Image (tube, coloured by chain):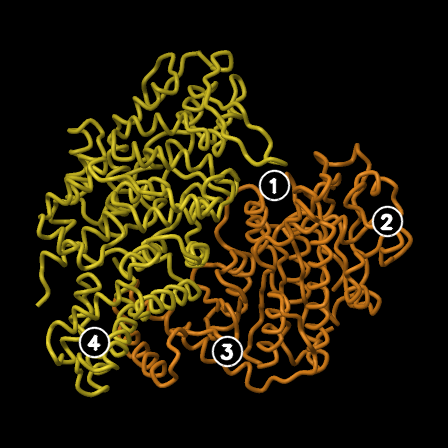
Amino acid sequence: MADQSIALMAHLMRRAGFGAPYAELETRAAKGYEATVEELLHPETQPELDNDIMLRYKTEWVNKNALEGQQEEWVFRMINTKRPLEEKIALFWHGILCTGHAKSENPRQQNVEFDMFRHKGMGSFHNLLMELAVDPAMVHYLDNCMSHKGAINENWGRELLELFSLGVGMDGKLNYSEDDVKEAARAFTGWTVVNAVPRYPYGRYLSKFVYNPKDHDDGVKTFLGETGNWNGEDIINIIVKQPAAARFVSRHLYNFFVADEPQVPAWQHTAPQDPEAIKMLEAEYFRSNYDIRSMLRVLFNSDFFKNARFAKVKSPVETVVGTTRLVGDFTFPKPGFNALALTIRYMGQDLLNPPTVEGWHTGKEWIDSGTLVERINFTADQVGNVNLPGVRDILARLRAEGPTLSPERLVDGCLDLLGGYKLAEETRSELVTLARNGGELQTGVADFSQRAAQMLQSIVATTEYLFA
Amino acid sequence: MASNTKDPVLVVLQLSGGNDGLNTVIPYSNPLYYDNRPKVGIPEDQVLAINDSIGFHPAMGPMKKLYDEGKLAVIQGIGYPKPSRSHFRSMDIWHTCEPTKVGDEGWLGRALRDLDPNKDNVLTGVNFGRGLPRALAAPGVPVASVGSLETYGVLTGIEAEDQRTMALETFTRTYEPMLGKGPVLSYFAQTGLDALQGADILSTALEGYSSSVKYGNDDVAQYMKNIVQTHLANLGTRVLYTTAPYNSFDTHAGQLANHTRLWTQTSSAIAAFYDDLKEHNATDNVVLLVFTEFGRRVHDNGSGTDHGAGGCAFVIGDAVKGGLYAEYPSLEAGKLLEGDLHFNNDFRGLYATLLERWMGLDSKPIVGGTFEQLDFL
């Protein structure tokens, strides 16, 4: 029988991290669910990633000039970190508070932002927005450096409200007006960057945020009904106390960590699928003074989270990193990192380079005929490789169950060891038939490895395995 | 013109990285060209002259031949207003026809929806390469994306034939029951079954194929060969797409050698593509578009050229009226756009020409408006 505490731990680790091999799930289950949640919420209690050997091996990770090198570096982190939620929250914010390589062409600068997400991404939403407003990658990406006293550029002002904090509307009503966009843009004039040295011939340099009071519009502004001589920080102060901000953060946390919601543009007119859950998160947002960590604690310990197993389509990052962690590959320098990072791109998620400032569309929209084939073939190749340590461990555990296995037990054992997966009854019975067709399953004979690996491959090829 | 019995087919070759138009179709008699290209210029005596002012890069002999036969249209001065010099953004604009906002639907995705509204054929659009270019993406439009025709398929990592057959049978039997289990599962199941069916059909494309034409071993040549094989298999495919990968045309450094290699390979791939179709008597309903996301900076940087604006494109086929279209942009300093060639010809007009006069589609909703068409068709 599946151990329910391990299946639940597998769920937590898939969502709060990038999944975990069975041995880690056992250790964590023994430690306890709530204790594991606390550990994840406090990454500083775990050692930092030891990157020294990698940096000697991968010089492009040191100079941070190329998109692909920086993608590799992040993928390595996600596979090997002892602080999974720190990387997961950075990925979460990267998909919402977007900058994109298409415009930035400066992976080094974007990485400064990702480090900020790692360190501040579970703190107060107010502080996070303040960090974002002075983040040089963002100031450049949304043109606030082009916004001047008397000649505003609305890009940052608009996306701050629409995509980063409030959303266009909720419960059928608008959350802000076009005037609010302009007033926000006015308040942020003078928030700019310096030291934008041209890229060629020596590569990109880091920019630095500066506040230029001479270029700041210090006239009176009315923003969301409040009038004063507002500067940028005042705008963020006003934003974070709005009910719409609570809704926005809650719904994004729910969509990323709990269950797929409709795409963000639909939120104005589409109510949350679980209004009670959103209400709980909104209450915690205000109670905790906008603290993301507190909201996540409520979320991970809730019944709505624990009951939402396989209610989300895995992202390409979750698919590739999760499978790689499961099979225990890419834990040290070896050729193939580039191909691994590119696989994520081919599945539709070009890290550092979301298609638009809206980020990636998630859920069902990850899948098309090209990306589906990439997913199935990648995951099947990994779990079918009986030389990888994670696969060897799964096979050893199956063998340890006894000299023979029933066809049902082979299927269920593989499902458990992959992380408490469940199949539709029709699917499971097809796989049992597949297991039975090969004759009696003797764990001691040579072809057992191949038959078990074939079962693992058939499981990861199912529609059910597309979900986390 | 195409015969009425065969549906018109569009093949697209994307030259990623920003091909240097100025060293592709070279204004060799213009002294400003040599002033601007002290280190990255092509000597006049090497240029394959088209007329007394411009000519092809010396590595483009096979394309010059197609030009001389009247089958190649050179589209000069192509671009769009307020050019972006970012590879990604500019390619996005070419893919989506959305120069002012970020779009997520591709022009060929929309065309495919019009060509096969009921999704009768999972292979109406086929891409060769990994990852779907946004040009082909549109919600609900299935497009097969083929890394290699020889190895394409589901669960191709399973080497033993009988095991793979068994795995694929299981795959089908586990996907079919998911049809009708809610919109998301149904969509995944349909997508998986479409992919499997597409792969099955495509695997037959190689069966009847034989040819005396030799292709190069580079990616573009191999993909052009796959395109011909797919076309000759009569699978009803109407749009075939491939990309010169890895931003290879991004010649910031070492351009003279790199660009020569790139055009040697690309020209011979295009010639092999055309000759192979010809050998199979299949040139009449195929038109090939060759494009890139931008041209490059007029003045060289000492070893290569940086990102620019206006560039050139090519359209090739028996149905094409070969020749020069639109105008070669001026190289005079006062007429450049921030150091780049100023476009005089919107790429959406080129697309509209192909869509209306070749594919027989209403171009307005696909390219987002009305643009001046060219008379190469």
Q: What element carries label 3?
A: helix
Q: For this rendering, which residue is in front, A441 or B125?
A: A441
Q: Is mark 1 on a helix, strand or loop?
A: loop
What chain is the orange one?
B
Q: Locate residue B194, reporting x and y percent.
A: 41, 73
Q: Which residue is disc 3 drawn over? A: B202
Q: Which residue is disc 2 drawn over? A: B28
Nearer the observer, disc 1 or disc 2?
2
Q: Residues within 10 Å of mark 1 (few under 14, many from 20)?
A: many
Q: For this rendering, which residue is in front, B38 or B76?
A: B38
Q: Which residue is disc 4 drawn over? A: A426
> For the view shown, which residue lies furthest in the right direction?
B52
Left or right: where A202 falls relative to B116? right
The disc labelled 3 sits on which kind of residue? Leu
The total number of labels drawn is 4
Nearer the observer, disc 2 or disc 4?
2
Q: Locate residue A466, reporting x and y percent.
A: 30, 62
The disc labelled 1 sits on which kind of residue? Ser
Left or right: where B24 falls relative to B364? right
Chain letter of mark 4 equals: A
Q: Which residue is disc 1 drawn over? A: B84
Give the colour of chain A.
yellow
Q: What element carries label 4?
A: helix
The disc labelled 2 sits on which kind of residue? Tyr
Q: How far apart are marks 4 and 1 (CA)?
A: 52 Å
Mark 1 vs 2, N-terminal side? 2
Q: Distance between the residues labelled 1 and 2?
A: 27 Å
| Relative height, residue A270 to residue B205 (above, below) | above
- Do callouts 2 and 4 mark residues in contact (Cβ within 8 Å)? no
